[in-house]
Amino acid sequence: MFSYDDFGAFPPEQIAYAKAVSDRLFDIYKHKPLAYIVTYGCQQNVSDSERIKGILEFLGYGFTDSPDNADFVLFNTCAVREHAEDRVYGNVGAIKKLKKSNPDMLLCVCGCMAQQEKNAQRFKSSFPYVDIVFGTQVSYRLPEFIYRRLTTGKRVFELSLDNGDIVEDIPVRRDGKIRGWLPIMYGCNNFCTYCIVPYVRGRERSRSPESILREAKEMVNAGFKEITLLGQNVNSYGKGSPYGVNFAQLLKMINGIDGDFRIRFMTSHPKDCTSQLLDAMAECEKVERHLHLPFQSGSDRILKLMNRHYDRETYLKLIDYARKRMPDIAFTSDIIVGFPGETYEDFKQTVSLVERVKFASLFTFIFSPRNGTPASNMEDSISREEKGKWFSQLLEVQDRISKEYSISLVGKTVRVLCEEKSTKEGFLIGKSSGTASVEFQADDTYIGKFADVHIDEYTNVLKGTLIK
Ligand code: SAH
Ligand code: SF4
Ligand code: F3S
């Protein structure tokens, strides 16, 4: 089952650990062991989990959708807001009972929340049935961690965050077959004052253009129709790297790959969003007409306190330039409501920016103080209740704008990627070049193909007719 060829840069010692684990698994479980993986947080985590699954498959694990029959349970966690952390403690706790009936089950916690010392400590002292805890930069060492746990009986805690070289050629088991994630850089150097990500993901590190292009080609050859380039900060790709390729150039290189596929990317930071990048988007026929560009707040005073390095006017200029180059482009964004010191006047600036840009959709969050970030020590006098009211007000405004956006598409013909069956028999759901989902009548053979769809009406969902 093992071949020592074809693993490129995947570390040989991990391959040796993998072989040693693989040899023991059947003796322990007497059947093909099954893994149950739960992923919280952003697409970066989803993508990391796909590599973790790739490694587990390589070790000889199969997969299950339920913890009840699992021999290996892993929680890949997120620390970006408090709510996310609370859920993890509850769900990890619930596995204790299952471990009683399957004592050989391994329980593993990794990702951004595990990376924080205080959480790792809590797993160590209050959750003795957690076997392995590891951080965001060492997941490629999973074969070693499992080997150590199985052979020494000691629990494993590995949190090193040394910002070393990116490990390439990690096996990957992608969740989908049509749309796939392709990480191009890891970490973040921006230190927005509210955000935990730079502390738990470490410094920005870019993959080489060669590795990215190789993986993109593999995905296209495997039949993927949409590749989303991923990074906390995709558009600062290449900075501080020896490769001499920036994000706009990388986009063009990927656009040059032969094949019928399209490209998305996320997340872009406005301070690194250059006109060169918007020009590249406009020139690349495979790049979708969608830009996710979080602005966080419409108030310059709050943007300064957030350490965002752009102002309202610069942001709006970028939007206007992008629209000029790509009239049909759809924008989405992230917003934080109730940042410390934010007044109702500041909040109204956020609402007015939302009204002005007319985003297709928004991801809105109420500020959640994160231990260790500067904003968690800033004076915050607005009550949670008041912030909740502002939040609902913003949602109402965006609801109306999202509807207007959908209605504006009625009568147009859009090219969609047919993704899946709709709940309605004989109908499919496809996604436009922007962000719209359309339902239309077509048989299953269209799944995974591009098609032109005329949009007929909007009744909470867009409904259309297949043209070809
Ligand atoms: N790197 C991306 C995404 C970071 S996390 C970016 O820079 O846009 C995704 C979103 O979560 C952020 O854009 C922000 O809107 C939100 N967020 C991050 N920290 C937060 C906090 N402490 N409280 C509330 N929302 C937060
Ligand atoms: Fe967090 Fe800011 Fe980095 Fe995004 S750019 S991950 S919000 S610090
Ligand atoms: Fe959460 Fe980590 Fe992503 S904190 S949002 S999973 S980078």
Image (cartoon, rainbow, N blue to C red):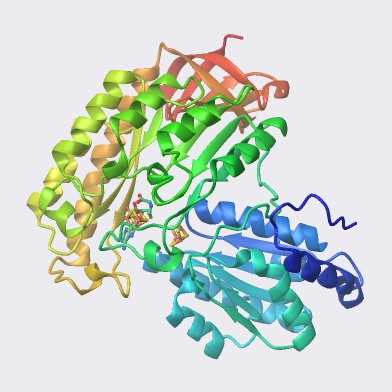
Whether residue 356 can be seen here: yes
**Whole-percent x and y of residue 198?**
38, 63
> In which quadrant of the rendered image does the N terminus lie?
bottom right
Q: Quadrant of residue 63?
A: bottom right
> In which quadrant of the rendered image does the C terminus lie?
top right
Left or right: 264, with 323 as reference point? right
Looking at the image, the residue that sits furthest to the left is 345
Left or right: 192, with 425 as reference point? left
Whether residue 62 can be seen here: no
Looking at the image, the residue that sits furthest to the bottom is 125
**Whole-percent x and y of residue 30?**
92, 72
Residue at left 18%, top 37%? 314
Q: Nearer the viewer, residue 140 or 156?
A: 140
**Whole-percent x and y of residue 12?**
75, 64
Q: Ligand 2 shows up in which quadrant of the image? A: bottom left
Q: Is residue 146 above or below residue 241?
A: below
**Whole-percent x and y of residue 329?**
36, 24
Residue at left 20%, top 55%? 389
Residue at left 25%, top 63%? 193
Left or right: 425, with 335 as reference point? right
Q: Is residue 136 above or below residue 225?
A: below
Q: Is residue 433 above or below residue 244?
A: above
Residue at left 47%, top 26%? 287
Q: Is residue 149 above or below residue 354?
A: below
Q: Nearer the viewer, residue 101 or 313?
A: 313
Left or right: 244, with 359 as reference point? right
